[in-house]
Image (spheres, rainbow, N blue to C red):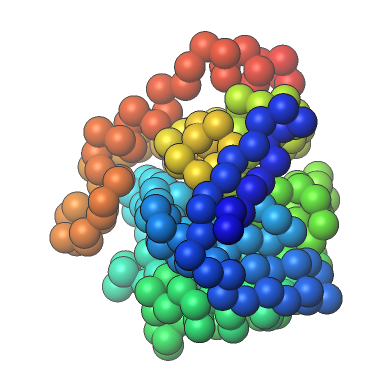
C-alpha cells in the first residue's frame, strides 16, 4: 500500500506504508496516521504530509531554536497551530521560558498525536504549557496578553489554516508582541508555483508591518521540493547581526540539525528566491 501526495499537477510524492493506523474526519479536516518502511510513523491532514518520525526534527528545530538564539529574553511564547507537539517539545527545553500558550483549532490533532506520535508530544506534560482549542485568528484578535515570541506553526493556507496567512492575523500578531518581539511563521516553499505564490503573499503582508522581515531556509525532504522557508519578523532583533551563537549549544540542548553554522547559513538565500521576494516589494 502506498500513500501518495500530489505536489503539482505533474509531480507526485509516494511512500510505501506498512499499515494505515487510523483515519478520522474531524469537524475541520481529514486526519490519517500511517506506519511506513522508510519514514516511520507519519500523519497527514487532508492528504498532505504534516510530520514523520524520520525528519520532523528538522522543521521543529529550525522554527524554534533560530529565534531563541536571537532574542535574549524570551519569557512568554505563543504557538499557533503546532498540535503535533514538536514545536512545544523544543520550547520546553529552555528553562527561562515562563509560559507557552498553544492555540490549536482541532483538538483531535493533539489527542491523536499523543497516541500515535508520543515522542513529539512530550512537551504537553510541562506545567508551563497551556492548551487552547480555538481559532488562532480569533485568539490573537481578542487576547490582551503580550508575547516575546509568536510561532505560527500552521498548515498550508487552505481550510483551517487559511486565516493564519491574512493581513488581519499578522496585524494582531504585531499588536500582541512586546516591543522586542519576534514572529516566526512557516513560509511555504519558493520552488513550485503554488507554494511560491503563497510565500510571496505572506512576505508582502509581513514586510509591510515589521521593520525587520526576512526569510530563512531548511532542507526538509518530505515537504514539496524539499526546499522550505520560514519567515522571520521582528520589532528589534536582527537574525544575523544580533546572533551571538546558538543558545541551544550554550544550554547543552542536543540538536540533530540546528547549529551555529546552520543558523547563519540559513539566511543565505539563493538568487531565485531573492528575486521572488523582491517582486513582492
Q: Residue at x 60, y 33 (%)?
A: 189
State the count of labels. Answer: 0
Q: Residue at x 73, y 21 (%)?
A: 280
| Residue 227 in view | yes
**Which residue does the image show at 64% across and 68% down from the upper left?**
32
Residue 83 on image: x %, y %? 59, 70
Which quarter shows the N terminus? bottom right
Residue 45: x and y in percent read: 68, 61
Q: Is residue 175 left or right of residue 2?
A: right
107 left or right of 42?
right
Residue 95 vertical placement versus 182 (above, below): below
Instruction: Report x, y in % for residue 190.
Output: 61, 27
- Residue 176 drawn above or below residue 102: above
Q: Is residue 25 left or right of residue 210?
A: right
Identify the residue at horizontal 73%, vertical 72% (top origin): 105
Of the pair 84 and 89, the residue shown nearer to us: 84
Residue 158 screen position, x and y as percent: 80, 50
Q: 181 or 27: nearer the eye?
A: 27
Say which quadrant the C terminus sits in. top right
Work out whether residue 51 or residue 11 is closer to the camera in this orientation and state it.
Answer: 11
Note whether 140 is above or below 216 in the view shown: below
In this view of the protein, can residue 181 be seen by the observer? no
Q: Nearer the viewer, residue 62 or 9?
A: 9
Amino acid at each position: 500500500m502506498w500513500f501518495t501526495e500530489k505536489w503539482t499537477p505533474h509531480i507526485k510524492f509516494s511512500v510505501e506504508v506498512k499499515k494505515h493506523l487510523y483515519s478520522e474526519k474531524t469537524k475541520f479536516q481529514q486526519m490519517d496516521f500511517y506506519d511506513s518502511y522508510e519514514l516511520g510513523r507519519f500523519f497527514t491532514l487532508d492528504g498532505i504530509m504534516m510530520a514523520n518520525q524520520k525528519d520532523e526534527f528538522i522543521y521543529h528545530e529550525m522554527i524554534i531554536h533560530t529565534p531563541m538564539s536571537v532574542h535574549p529574553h524570551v519569557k512568554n511564547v505563543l504557538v499557533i497551530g503546532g498540535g503535533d507537539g514538536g514545536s512545544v517539545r523544543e520550547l520546553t527545553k529552555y528553562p527561562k521560558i515562563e509560559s507557552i500558550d498553544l492555540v490549536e483549532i482541532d483538538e483531535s490533532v493533539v489527542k491523536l498525536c499523543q497516541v500515535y506520535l508520543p515522542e513529539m508530544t512530550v512537551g504537553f506534560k510541562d506545567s508551563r504549557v497551556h492548551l487552547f482549542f480555538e481559532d488562532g485568528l480569533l485568539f490573537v484578535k481578542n487576547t490582551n496578553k503580550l508575547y516575546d515570541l509568536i510561532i505560527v506553526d500552521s498548515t498550508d493556507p487552505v481550510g483551517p489554516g487559511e486565516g493564519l496567512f491574512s493581513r488581519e492575523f499578522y496585524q494582531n500578531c504585531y499588536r500582541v508582541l512586546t516591543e522586542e518581539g519576534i514572529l516566526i511563521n512557516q513560509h511555504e516553499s519558493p520552488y513550485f508555483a503554488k507554494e511560491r505564490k503563497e510565500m510571496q503573499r505572506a512576505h508582502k503582508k509581513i514586510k509591510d508591518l515589521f521593520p525587520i522581515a526576512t526569510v530563512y531556509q531548511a532542507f526538509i525532504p518530505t515537504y514539496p521540493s524539499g526546499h522550505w522557508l520560514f519567515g522571520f519578523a521582528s520589532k528589534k532583533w536582527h537574525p544575523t547581526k544580533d546572533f551571538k551563537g546558538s543558545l541551544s549549544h550554550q544550554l547543552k540542548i542536543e540538536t540533530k540539525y540546528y547549529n551555529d553554522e546552520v543558523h547563519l547559513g540559513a539566511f543565505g538565500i539563493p538568487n531565485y528566491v531573492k528575486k521572488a521576494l523582491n517582486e513582492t516589494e
